[in-house]
Amino acid sequence: MRDTPQWGIAPVPERLRVLGLLDTTLLWTNLGISLLVLVLPAYFDLPLRDALAATLVGGLIGNLMLAVAALIGADARVPTMVLQRAPLGRRGSYLPTALNVLQCLGWAIFELIVIATAAGLLCDKLFGFKGVWIWKLLFGAVAAFLALLGPVGFVRRFVRKFAIWAVLASVIYLAWWIVDGVHVQRIWSAGGHKGSFWLAVDTVVAVTVSWAPLVADYTRFSRNRRVAFFGVGIGYLLPTLFQFGFGAILVLSRGVDPNHPELILIAIAGGGLAAALALLALTVDETDEAFANVYSAAVSTQNLFPGIPQRVLIVGASVLATGGALFIDMRSYQRFLLLLGAVFVPLLGVLVADWLLAGAHYTRRHVFEGPAFRPANIVAWIAGFVVYEWLYQPADLGFWSRWVGHLPTPSYQIGASVPSFAAAFLLTAAAVALGSSRAAARARREPLPGRR
């Protein structure tokens, strides 16, 4: 079976839809393991009991959203940002495309920093020097190479043969290392925490839904909608529960600084041979995320410039991500995640509502022959964004934060993800239904051919 590294924005033909349930599950289990996520519970400031409850609630909500997005991608067989042409219009899809390219590059920079740090610590342990900048260059090139394989080649040549074993080894080692010597009863319901349960839920949802703008780039190669839904939903839920659950134990027992995730690597490196092997496994794990963000940055860009070869865009995205890893210090990222949630959670609500009202099926006509803009759906997306920001009350976006901060908010906490999704979903459903009613009324008023 030939791999399909250069398949562009056209619908994937049936002969190339070769990723089964095992392939899809393995891919998303691998993509879900990341040290960047492991330290996020430090932002929760909750006792272990509440942190685990927030993980479960946020994991179920976020993974259901992600699985539905995966299903729609498998149905339409096009990349996610091309899919946005259906609800938003061809040119209306350009803004979310640009935002998705930025988030992919941002994540790729994060990942390359973590990968290079892990490789540098391993090198220092074995040979006495780190050379972190060298590793950034090397793994930037590795990410480009893997992205050039495409999703099918990546799963079959890398995930099945190497990455799945690295994931298994790192999960086992990390679980032991995190719980070793921990007094769970002491941190289970300890006081002194001032965090918000629903803000923690929104953080879990935001991490998960940050993959929604990428998911169809891969599930367009899944065999059918069922495979995409369960493969992504289950495949990503398992590492979500592991990382946020064990991450909560880690930060509560060891006081990990979320702004310096590389300190976990330094702590892991303090062991012997097992620690060195764990660092090697973690390095392989993180390479998955770098691949995905480089590949999806290139595929998303093709929605804007379909004439540029995908290989050129992959190399360009790799160069930008590597340069960012070399020169940009990107560590504090909870606000980055919540901003992504504010953008992409309501966008998913618009997509799901429009898709359902299209008969739960997008044809080529829906995606490629629609209008340039669908203003009502764009307004619904913006309204969902405002609802998210209104309920979340951001504190560091200048004028926007001051304006939103003056709006009255509910006296009880309800989270921002579900209300934002619901607002965008309902407004889109109303707009589509109204548009369909008007079109039907116009059709009734127009005379049939041959009649006066």
Image: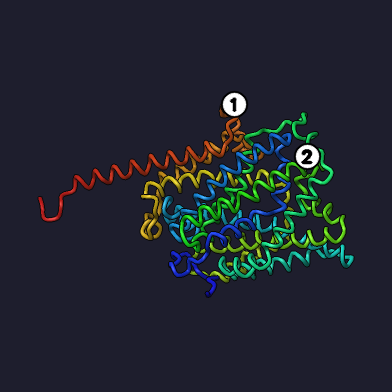
Instruction: Say which amino acid is labelled 2.
Output: Leu
In the picture as drawn, the residue positioned furthest to the right comes out as 128
| Local crowd size for mark 1, using a 10 Å CA cut-off: few (<14), some (14–19), many (≥20) | few
Left-right relation of 125 to 57:
right
Q: Residue 62 sits in which quadrant?
A: top right
Marks 1, 2: nearer the viewer: 2
**Residue at image point 50% right, 61% down:** 222
Nearer to the camera, 108 or 197: 197
Identify the coloring: rainbow
Residue 161 x, y percent position in the rendering: 66, 68
**Residue at image point 73% right, 68% down:** 138
**Residue at image point 74% right, 54% down:** 172
The mark that comes first in sequence, 1 or 2, is: 2
Q: Is residue 427 above or below residue 191?
A: below
Left-right relation of 419 to 47:
left
**C-alpha gap between disc 1 and disc 2:** 26 Å
Residue 69 x, y percent position in the rendering: 50, 51
Q: Circle 1 is placed at which residue position?
A: 412
Left-right relation of 163 to 424:
right
Q: Circle 2 is placed at which residue position?
A: 252
Tell me the SS state at disc 1. Answer: loop
Instruction: Say which amino acid is labelled 1.
Output: Tyr
Question: From this viewpoint, is residue 88 visible?
Answer: yes
Residue 306 x, y percent position in the rendering: 48, 66
Residue 415 x, y percent position in the rendering: 59, 34
- The disc placed on residue 105 is none
